[in-house]
Image (cartoon, rainbow, N blue to C red):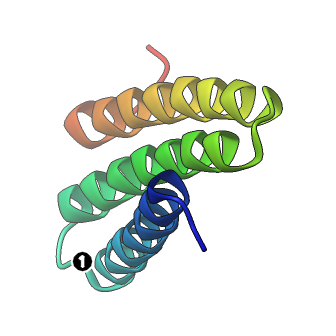
Amino acid sequence: MQTLLETAIAYALVCMLVAMAFCAVRLLIGPTAHDRVLALDTLWICGMLLAVVLGLRFGTQVYFEVAILVALLGFVSTIALAKFLMRGEIIE
């Protein structure tokens, strides 16, 4: 019999995967570039949270380090894309 924590982790994993699927759909069919950037940003956040939940599930520190790396890369890429959409260039 599963414990309450295992059930909650399984439910969280399913919710994260559904959210990532919705973000992928918005990324592919988004009518504007701004919608696609927001979908990509949300996809990064869902990926980070998925790594955290997997770290809780398997009890290893590697997943938490991956989550930190995904968060840093996601933040930098979102800033670069937003700057590109505003100015048309990334490097001044």
- Tell me the residue at 32%/78% (across/down): 22
Q: Label 1 sits on what residue type?
A: Gly
x and y, in percent, of residue 73 in the image:
59, 30
**Front residue of this view, candidates 67 and 44:** 67
Q: What residue did someone put label 1 on? A: 30
Side of 52 relative to 49 (left or right): right
When the figure is inspected, residue 82 is found, relative to residue 75, above or below; the finding is below
Does 50 sit above or below residue 68? Answer: below
Q: In this view, does 80 lie to the left or right of 55?
A: left
Q: Which of 91 and 29 is in front in this view?
A: 29
Q: Is residue 45 visible?
A: yes
Viewport quadrant of the N terminus = bottom right
Q: Pick whichever, 72 or 19, lies toward us.
A: 19
Relative to 77, is 25 above or below?
below
Categorize mark 1 by other alpha carbons within 10 Å: few (<14), some (14-19), many (20+): some
How many numbered tags mark residues here? 1
Task: Work out which residue is located at the far front of the displayed protein and give it.
Answer: 1
Taking the spot 29% from the left edge, 86% from the top edge, the residue there is: 29
Residue at 52% x, 29% y is 71
As drawn, the residue found furthest toward the top would be 92
Q: Quadrant of residue 68?
A: top right
Q: Which image quarter is the C terminus in?
A: top left
- Asked if 28 appears above or below 27 in the picture, the reply is below
Where residue 4 sits in the image (x, y, percent)?
Answer: 44, 57
Position in image of residue 44 (x %, y %): 47, 48
Give the structural element (helix, strand or loop) at label 1.
Answer: loop
Q: Can residue 88 be seen in this snapshot? A: no
In the foreground, 2 or 14: 2
Q: Residue at x 45, y 74 (%)?
A: 14
